[in-house]
Image (spheres, rainbow, N blue to C red):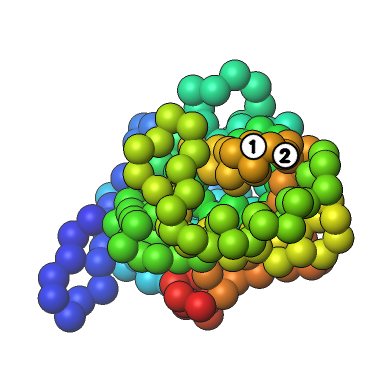
Amino acid sequence: MSTARGKIPTMRLDRLLANLGYGSRREAQALVAAALVTLDGETVAKADLHVPVTPDLQRRMLIEGVPLDPPPPLILIMHKPLGVVCSHREPGRSVYALLPPRWARRDPAISTIGRLDKETSGLLLMTDDGGLLHRIISPKADIAKRYLVTLECSLRGNEADIFASGNMLIEGEAKPLLPASLEVIAPTLCWLTIREGRYHQVRSMFEATGNHVIALHRDRIGGLDLPEDMAAGAYRILTDVELGLVMDRR
């Protein structure tokens, strides 16, 4: 993508389509040759056309009569369902299988911003912007994440103090956890808000108190709540306002 200070970045059309997963550059050129690509209502005649990659390009360009897939940077919000994993390396169906198949060929690739394990549902963010990903997951970001926790046994009553102490250790870790906030809803149901993301952290915290998590659902990252009308498995592009909420250190 060519760019200069103060100018809109541009990219050759065949390279843009290939990077968005529409096929190889040769296949992208074939789409243009077959008059299947239009821009602002006009058929594009040349695959080497340098296209301004603007936020409204998805609306202005059609591929076979369908709006262009969103160009980078892409940020998605997803309601991760139970039973799917957040890694290409883990066995089982992944969250990437919930996206359009050609998105698996996008360059840069789409990655999850942090992970939820197979048996955890809820708010998940995904992006192809590596810089943004690291800004959100960095410990320096201090972004809170809230979970609805269903427990096997009733709370003992001292968990809130233990979690908030900043001295809690979990198995396999030498560094104490950052203070976390517990809000009790019922004897076996609570909200837990943490500001880091260690491996299976929420489950390990309750295991350390002699309890067992039987259901876990993340509903908030920063100041962004999972939309109540977003069904499990659904996703959409995150708005700029919502991204600002993610970075809210409340």
Q: Is residue 18 above or below residue 156?
A: above
- Residue 211 - label: 2
Estimate how packed mark 2 is, as few (under 14), some (14 to 19) or many (20 or more) residues with alpha carbons within 10 Å: some
The amino acid at mark 1 is Glu
To which quarter of the image does residue 132 belong?
bottom left
Q: CA distance from mark 1 to mark 2?
A: 5 Å
**Callout 1–callout 2 Cβ contact below 8 Å:** yes
Q: Nearer the viewer, residue 96 or 203?
A: 203
Residue 167 % position (x, y): 43, 53
Secondary structure at badge 1 equals: helix
Q: Nearer the viewer, residue 64 or 135?
A: 135
- Residue at 59% across, 39% down: 208
In the picture, the quarter occupied by the N terminus is: bottom left
The residue at the far left in this view is 5
Q: Nearer the viewer, residue 155 or 85?
A: 155
Q: Is residue 161 above or below residue 199?
A: below
In this rendering, would 50 be left or right of 234? left
Residue 105 % position (x, y): 45, 35
- Residue at 59% across, 62% down: 161
Q: Is residue 66 visible?
A: no
- Residue 59 - label: none
- Residue 207 - label: 1
The amino acid at mark 2 is Asn
